Amino acid sequence: MHRPAAAATTVARKRPASAMARLPEVEFFSAWFCPYAQRAWIALEHHGVPYKKVEGLLPDKPGEDFVGYIKNPRLLELNPKGLVPTLSEGPSSPPVYESLVCVEYIDELA
């Protein structure tokens, strides 16, 4: 099937470097296996939003035989359900969670 040329390509919106420099670094809580967190990560990368990735699940006994995971205490402060993705711009802004809400929020930041 032949697709029109306009539909075959996707162009990412890019902000000028000066505008991106003004964006705050977002704290991005993720889990390596979570497709919902990956959705938010793709949006962050696509828009070039600066972020610090924080693993939401930590080994329960680091340095010993693996038994399981515990939720990152900082994640639980921001999102009592402990779900990823969770985004935070700092103490002056409320946290954002739920993957589609995070993607919309990232779109607005960019």
Image (spheres, rainbow, N blue to C red):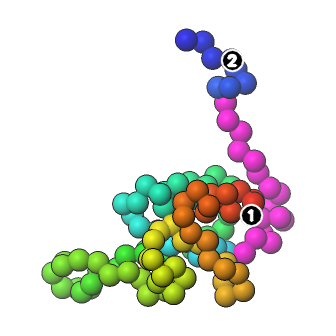
Q: Quadrant of residue 51?
A: bottom right
In depth, the one of 87 and 97 nearer the eye is 97
Q: Residues within 10 Å of mark 1 (few under 14, many from 20)?
A: few
Q: Is residue 22 magenta?
A: yes
Q: Is residue 21 magenta?
A: yes
Q: Residue 51 bears which disc, if any?
A: none
Quadrant in the rendering for residue 55: bottom left
State which quadrant residue 100 falls in.
bottom right
User: Which percent across, then down, holds residue 15?
Assistant: 80, 55
On the picture, is 56 further left or further right than 11?
left
Residue 30 position, x and y percent, is 47, 68
Q: Secondary structure at mark 1?
A: helix
Q: What stretch of residues is rendered in magenta? A: 9-24
| Residue drawn at 74 percent across, 63 percent down | 109
Task: Give the Cα distance between marks 2 and 1.
Answer: 31 Å
Q: Residues within 10 Å of mark 2 (few under 14, many from 20)?
A: few
Q: Is residue 31 visible?
A: yes
Q: Say if 50 sits above or below 99 in the image.
A: below
Picture disc at residue 4:
2
Identify the mark at residue 109; answer none if there is no mark.
1
Residue drawn where x is 51% and y is 67% of the image? 85
Query: Mark 2 is on which residue type?
Result: Pro
| Residue beneath the point at 80% across and 61% down | 17
Q: Is residue 96 above or below residue 74?
A: above
- The quadrant in which the N terminus is found is top right
Identity of the amino acid at label 1?
A: Leu
